[in-house]
Image: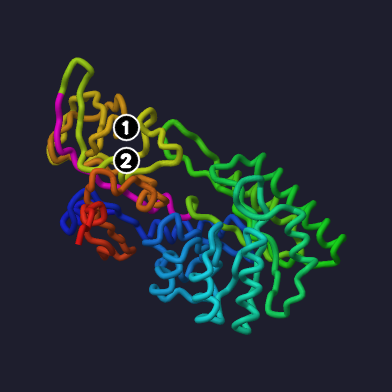
Amino acid sequence: MDYNKVLDKVSTPCYVFDINNLKNRISYLKSKFNKEFNLVYAVKANSFIAKELDEDVERFEICSPGEFEICNNLGIDHSKMVISGVYKDYESINKMVSNYDDIGKYTIESVNQYELLKELATKYNRKLHILIRLTSGNQFGVTEEELKDIIKNNDNDHFVIDGIEYFSGTQKRIKKIEREIEYLEEFVNSIESELNFKINEIEYGPGLPIYYFQDEEFDEDSFLDEVNSLLSRFKDKEISIESGRSIASSCGYYLTKVSDMKSNKNGNHVMLDGGINHLVYYGQTMAMRIPHFDLLQANKEDEKETYTLYGSLCTINDIIVKSLEVNKLHLGDIFVFKNVGAYSVTEGISLFLSRNLPNVVLYKSDGEIIVVRNNKNTYEINYPNYE
């Protein structure tokens, strides 16, 4: 990527999402899984790249009315949408069911959601295709008993139960994935034998890990080969692999500039024009560990110095990296933090201190740069309107 070309167009701080990198990542993941498996993108990871993925993934997992509006306005085909989420309010779901008869699937995460969707399917004479989310013990999904009761009691011709959705978390090790798939296999067999009901599809979120820091080693090829082998146990099921972090992380870059420098008895302190309001790695442990980064310097010196990097927020928590040894820094030098394509753009505490939201840039495969969000102020959101 030509960072200077980006900086000619926008100022720091900014996000850059490399679309060629994104496409290569999708190709790699698909090469590791059986060709008949579906790849499902979780929009919550990064909505700015959703349209760029439209031709590359089979479905989009949508977890809020806002995400639906984004995907709908981007022209993503309704048949590729999975309307998910732990909270489905009547107004939003009523609007979707009444206005659109071609939405791909809805998930059920509670008995109340089941009743709501069944009511609306009947009311609007819609045939809704359903995935029932099985809980892993947290607040998501229904219990085994509730899931079986929903299947047993479903007598609505408008309500087609296609299969099960299961997701327990992210950054999982292979042993946990193996246990989960064994559990799902056993549970699906019990449904089919006890209820004489065929489970046609399993949408599974393996929580594929991404390693963000320089001291980590990960044999992703072998890991994905094992995941694929485990999922291949379901011989007669449609398998959909849901992922957000693993798809999006590697395409993202966050550019932030050295805006001030000072030294005292505790060392060299560098202030950046960004910070933890924009930059989020899984676990947010980056102050103690070194993420992958590039350093852009107009005047590069061979002399090394050790610095602690801070963000622009007035809080002692806004520490980016401690004890980082790099070439001697100058005002205006730019750090490029890598692997921020998932969650940073949406998960940071972006309203804190009423700092502006960063520019968001798509870097296309032909070098074209598209600014998809200009720098935006947030003080208007934090401003109390007495009128």
Label 2: element kind: loop
From the viewer's side, name the closer residue of 35 and 122. Answer: 122
In the orientation shown, which residue stands out farthest toward the front? 387
Disc number placed over residue 338 in the picture, else none: none
From the viewer's side, name the closer residue of 282 and 218. Answer: 282
> Which residue type does callout 2 highlight?
Ile
Identify the residue at horizontal 23%, vertical 17% (top origin): 266
In the orientation shown, which residue stands out farthest toward the bottom? 125
- 317 in relation to 82, above or below: above
- 192 in relation to 281, above or below: below
Q: Is the magenta stretch mostly helix, strand or loop?
A: strand
Disc number placed over residue 276 in the picture, else none: 2
Q: Distance between the residues labelled 2 and 1?
A: 8 Å
From the viewer's side, name the closer residue of 217 and 334. Answer: 334
**Residue 249: in magenta span:** yes
> Which residue type does callout 1 highlight?
Asn
Circle 1 packing at 10 Å, graded few (<14), some (14-19), many (20+), is few
Read off the residue under disc 1. Answer: 317
**Quarter placement of the C terminus:** bottom left
Identify the residue at horizontal 58%, vertical 73% (top origin): 104
Identify the residue at horizontal 66%, vertical 73% (top origin): 118
Identify the residue at horizontal 59%, vertical 68% (top origin): 106
CB atoms at circles 2 and 1 under 8 Å apart? yes
**Residue 334: in magenta span:** no
How far across and down, in percent of the image, does residue 45 sit?
Answer: 44, 54
Horizontal side, residue 170 vs residue 186: left or right? left
Label 1: element kind: loop
How far across and down, in percent of the image, does residue 236 sit?
Answer: 76, 65
How far across and down, in percent of the image, does residue 366 sit?
Answer: 30, 65
Residues shaded magenta: 247-262
Which one is earlier in the sequence, the residue at label 2 or at label 1? Answer: 2
